[in-house]
Amino acid sequence: MSQTTGFQNDTIVSNAFINNPFIIDITANTDDLDSNDYSLLVITNTTGGSLNITGSVAKDDGYILGIYNSETSTGNVVLKYNTTSAAANQFKNFTGVDITLTPGKFFRFFYYEDKWR
């Protein structure tokens, strides 16, 4: 029996993301975004400016959520750790700073201990 390495596991997870996207156009700053149980959110931003997302509806511990900014030239998506989202829905990275997804960038969160991390 062969063992699965972390790299192979990441590749499997990435392929699952690609096969099951939820494409959503966001036109205003958003709190508590609902992924509708999809594992990948493909964000389109037709405003041409920066948009803030402060959280996504909570899931069970271990749930993986990828967020991809599909814009090609303008329109950053900023993932903010902010109290305007319900506490259990908030994004919280280990440095405490906002995560800016420039066009074409991707970030993956894991749900753990009542936060997206």
Image (cartoon, helix red, strand yellow):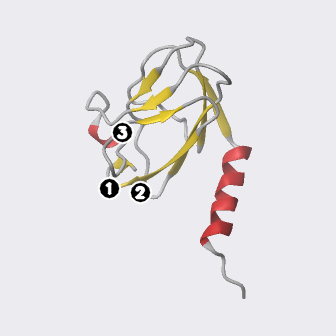
Q: Quadrant of residue 88?
A: top left
- Helix, strand or loop at disc 3? helix
Q: Nearer the viewer, residue 95 or 17?
A: 95
Q: Position of residue 89 (x, y in %)?
A: 36, 39
Between disc 3 and disc 2, whose residue precedes? 2
Q: Amino acid at mark 1?
A: Glu
Q: Amino acid at mark 3?
A: Asn
92, above or below 112, in the image: above
* Badge 1 vs badge 2, beta-carbon distance below 8 Å: yes
* Badge 3 vs badge 2, beta-carbon distance below 8 Å: no
67, above or below 9, in the image: above
Q: Position of residue 59 (x, y in %)?
A: 43, 47
Q: Nearer the viewer, residue 103 or 115?
A: 103
**Residue tagged 2:** 61
Q: How many marks?
A: 3
Residue at 53%, 35% (x, y): give it.
35
Residue at 37%, 41% (x, y): give it.
91
**Residue tagged 1:** 113
Distance from disc 1 to disc 2, alpha carbons, whole Å, reads 7 Å
Q: Amino acid at mark 2?
A: Asp
Residue at 32%, 50% (x, y): give it.
114
Indicate which disc residue 20 carries.
none
Crowdedness of circle 2 by 10 Å Cα count: few (<14), some, many (20+)?
few
**Residue tagged 3:** 89
In the rendered image, is residue 87 in sight?
yes
Q: Is residue 84 left or right of residue 20?
A: left
Between disc 3 and disc 1, whose residue precedes? 3
